């Protein structure tokens, strides 16, 4: 933990501690000329289970190799503040588990989880029929158990949240799928891991509703040409169609399991 | 445990030991009950329940002496390991204490640390990537707990769920170590149960006895 924050509400460790330093931690860039374990346009296998959290209205757990995200939906429930809204509201809160990253995270909120929350909110907001629940709020709580790059947090979080919304029986106009891509020189690698996205020139996360063939959000950072960005969007969109089939299958299986309970 | 799901992760970091305990490391257990796991928790700082549970977990781990803190020392007075034992509740369906303690013990049992050396000249601690990692020197006296509740002064319930918890008059947690040694007992309320024929009896002994059986069943599962 870089900065020390004393909090009397938790068990505290010593004042200031550093993650261990290893004798060899320099990875040379030249090692990543070609992808080792999968093709450039392949994504990591997805494990998706809706209905993990029994207390929630809807929930989902998603795992893509190292990235593990759990998501719960509560609501629609009464909005906390009294001001009147004709439409419903969507509230996304993202939390990192302290052990989710390379070095330990402080249990407090920081800028990173807010920005991921914003990205997931952006991806989902246009798919939810907010006019069906005026004056109410849907709370989406996302806990990141293990990260593998910020891109996969956003994409896995969006997929999990959209699955959980559907499982909760909240009216949506379509399932939101999300896929990330990284520009590695002239190549495009889909679903980059943390190492790969650090080495890339730029990365892009596309969220779309494959059933309506419409894009809900594009989140791009780094450096890439317009034609390359469009190529990334194309590649992501194709992959989102495949992911859509996986999610639909998981939802069907989940609801069959629920009906037997 | 049932529907209660707890994930525990351990992060090791290096820090300077306390001045009065030069050759001891640190063990820092915390439980987080995020708003995700149950509708009764709100986002924000840890709830009262989370604070109480974290403190009880700390007490149980320290009292059992599961990990001699001296084994975490790298160089007396200069460097020692800090083990942050963080548990997150994914699904809260009552009795988070037993589930978390079990998760923490299991996580400690498969933790390995890299071999570290302190260089007095540069004041830096360097870990070796090549040398094999070493498991923690855990004692066999690891704590296992069982929680019981008494409903309506009549019924003794083991492992109460989230639905049962608010209805209980009494809640008893028994933490046992090796060979049934008692590490701690916490009891809120009276442990007297009245039978159907009007007789009254104290059930604390019964609770300890069934915790012993519980521990015998659980220990082989830890591997």
Image (cartoon, coloured by chain):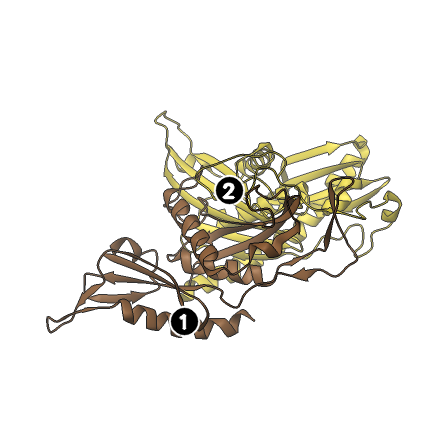
Q: Chain of mark 2?
A: A
**From the viewer's perspective, is B119 left or right of A46?**
right
In the image, A160 versus B80, the foreground residue is: B80
Q: Residue at x 36, y 45 (%)?
A: B40
- Left or right relative to B127: residue A169: left
Q: In terms of image quadrants, where is residue B202?
A: bottom left
Q: Tell me if residue A64 can be seen.
A: yes
- The residues tagged by marks 1 and 2 sit, at their Cα atoms, a distance apart of 30 Å
Chain A: its colour in the image is yellow
In the image, is residue B139 above or below residue B113? below
Q: What is the number of the mark on residue A260?
A: none
Residue A105 position in % (x across, y down): 59, 41
Q: Which residue is mark 1?
A: B180
Look at 85% across and 47% down and name the residue there. Answer: A32
Which quadrant, please, contains the N terminus of chain A?
A: top right
Q: Residue under mark 1: which chain is it in?
A: B
How many other residues sit within 10 Å of disc 1, few (<14), some (14-19) or many (≥20)? Answer: some
Residue B59: x %, y % from top left: 43, 53
The secondary element bearing badge 2 is classed as: loop
Residue under label 2: A12
Question: Could you say where residue A22 lies in the image, as x and y percent from the top left?
Answer: 76, 48
The tint of chain B in the picture is brown
SS for callout 1? helix
């Amino acid at each position: 933990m870089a900065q020390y924050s004393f909090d009397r509400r938790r068990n505290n460790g010593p004042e200031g501690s550093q993650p261990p330093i290893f004798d060899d931690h320099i990875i040379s860039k030249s090692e990543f000329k070609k992808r080792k374990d999968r093709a450039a346009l392949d994504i990591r296998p997805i494990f998706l289970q809706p209905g993990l959290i029994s207390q929630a209205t809807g929930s989902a757990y998603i795992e893509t190799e190292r990235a593990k995200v759990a998501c719960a939906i509560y609501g629609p429930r009464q909005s906390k503040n009294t001001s009147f809204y004709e439409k419903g509201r969507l509230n996304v809160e993202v939390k990192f588990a302290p052990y989710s990253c390379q070095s330990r995270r402080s249990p407090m909120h920081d800028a990173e989880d807010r920005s991921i929350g914003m990205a997931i909110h952006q991806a989902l907001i246009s798919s939810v029929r907010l006019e069906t629940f005026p004056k109410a709020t849907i709370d989406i709580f996302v806990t990141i158990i293990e990260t593998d790059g910020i891109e996969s947090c956003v994409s896995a979080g969006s997929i999990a949240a959209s699955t959980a919304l559907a499982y909760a029986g909240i009216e949506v106009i379509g399932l939101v799928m999300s896929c990330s891509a990284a520009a590695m020189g002239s190549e495009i690698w889909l679903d980059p891991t943390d190492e790969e996205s650090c080495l890339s020139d730029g990365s892009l996360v596309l969220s779309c509703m494959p059933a309506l063939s419409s894009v809900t959000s594009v989140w791009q950072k780094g450096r890439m040409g317009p034609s390359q960005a469009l190529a990334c969007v194309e590649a992501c969109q194709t992959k989102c169609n495949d992911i859509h089939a996986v999610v639909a299958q998981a939802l069907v299986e989940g609801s069959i399991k629920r009906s037997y309970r | 445990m049932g529907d209660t799901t707890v994930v525990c992760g351990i992060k090791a970091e290096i820090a300077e030991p306390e001045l009065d305990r030069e050759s001891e490391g640190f063990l820092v257990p915390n439980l987080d009950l995020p708003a995700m796991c149950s509708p009764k928790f709100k986002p924000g700082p840890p709830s009262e329940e989370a604070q109480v549970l974290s403190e009880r977990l700390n007490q149980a781990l320290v009292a059992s002496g599961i990990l001699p803190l001296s084994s975490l020392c790298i160089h007396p007075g200069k460097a020692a390991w800090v083990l942050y034992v963080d548990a997150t509740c994914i699904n809260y369906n009552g009795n988070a204490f037993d589930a978390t303690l079990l998760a923490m013990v299991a996580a400690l049992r498969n933790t390995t640390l890299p071999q570290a050396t302190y260089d007095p000249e540069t004041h830096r601690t360097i870990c070796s990537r090549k040398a094999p990692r070493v498991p923690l020197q855990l004692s066999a006296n690891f704590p296992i707990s069982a929680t019981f509740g008494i409903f309506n002064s009549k019924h003794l319930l083991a492992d109460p769920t989230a639905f049962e918890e608010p209805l209980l008059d009494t809640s008893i947690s028994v933490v046992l170590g090796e060979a049934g040694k008692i590490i701690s007992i916490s009891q809120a309320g009276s442990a007297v149960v009245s039978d159907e024929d009007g007789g009254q009896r104290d059930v604390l002994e019964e609770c300890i006895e069934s915790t012993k059986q519980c521990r015998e069943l659980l220990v082989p599962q830890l591997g």
